[in-house]
Image (cartoon, grey):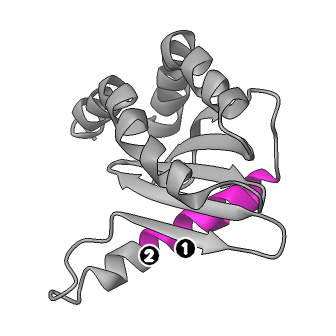
Amino acid sequence: SRLCFVWLLAMSSQSTIQPYLSALCERVAGLQTIIVTDRDGVVILRAPEQAIDDHRNEQIMTTIFSLTTDQTSKIKALGQANHILTFYDTCICLQANHLPLVITLKSSLTANPGELLDLLPDLKKALDITRSTILRETDKF
């Protein structure tokens, strides 16, 4: 099934991209977690690996992001939403489309939001093989 495929893909992706994601979390001041999911919130990659927040909350946030970008894209004058940067009481959350993937960066309030945004092009490039594989395989369903 689709969920089984995503899990198998996540296991194979971890051996190549996981060290890169973990290194980013260590290198970028304030960056706490990088989570890569599908649009439904199924986790494909997570860094650091031991960082386990509430899976249900992560899934809800991804769903809200997906719905928000879908709805705002209906306003043709704005174009497609690429990412959403949200400041909460306790953290900063940056979510970005790399369809069919959603990239979430969670950081402390002391993190530099511009630096988080600057990470997106390199993150997307690093995830291109994972993205292509998921696109190819999900087209079969």
> Which residue is found at the position 75% from the left and 51% from the top?
55
Q: Is residue 96 above or below residue 20?
A: below
Residue type at mark 2? Answer: Leu
User: Which portion, as a residue range, is magenta?
Assistant: 54-67
- Height in image: 121 above or below 13? below
Residue 34, x across and y down, in percent: 63, 41
Would you say the residues marked 2 and 1 are in contact, meaning their CB atoms lie under 8 Å apart? Answer: yes
**According to the image, label 2 marks what residue?**
67
As for residue 55 lying within the magenta part, the answer is yes
Q: Position of residue 116 (x, y in %)?
A: 54, 50
Image side of residue 67 versus residue 111, left or right: left
Q: Badge 2, how many Cα within 10 Å: few under 14, some, many 20+?
A: few
Toward the viewer: 113 or 104? 113
> Which x, y percent locates residue 12?
50, 13
The total number of labels drawn is 2
Q: Which residue is mark 1?
A: 64
- Residue in view at x 64 percent, y 22 percent: 23
Q: Nearer the viewer, residue 137 or 15?
A: 15
Specify the quadrant that holds the C terminus. Answer: top left
Q: Position of residue 115 (x, y in %)?
A: 53, 49
Residue 7 marker:
none
Secondary structure of the magenta portion, mostly? helix
Q: Is residue 8 left or right of residue 130?
A: right
**Can residue 2 be found in the magenta stretch?**
no
Label 1 CA crowd tier, 10 Å (few <14, some 14–19, many 20+): some
Cα separation between marks 2 and 1: 5 Å
For mark 1, give the secondary structure.
helix
**Rendered residue at 35%/84% (across/down):** 71
Outermost residue, top direction? Answer: 15
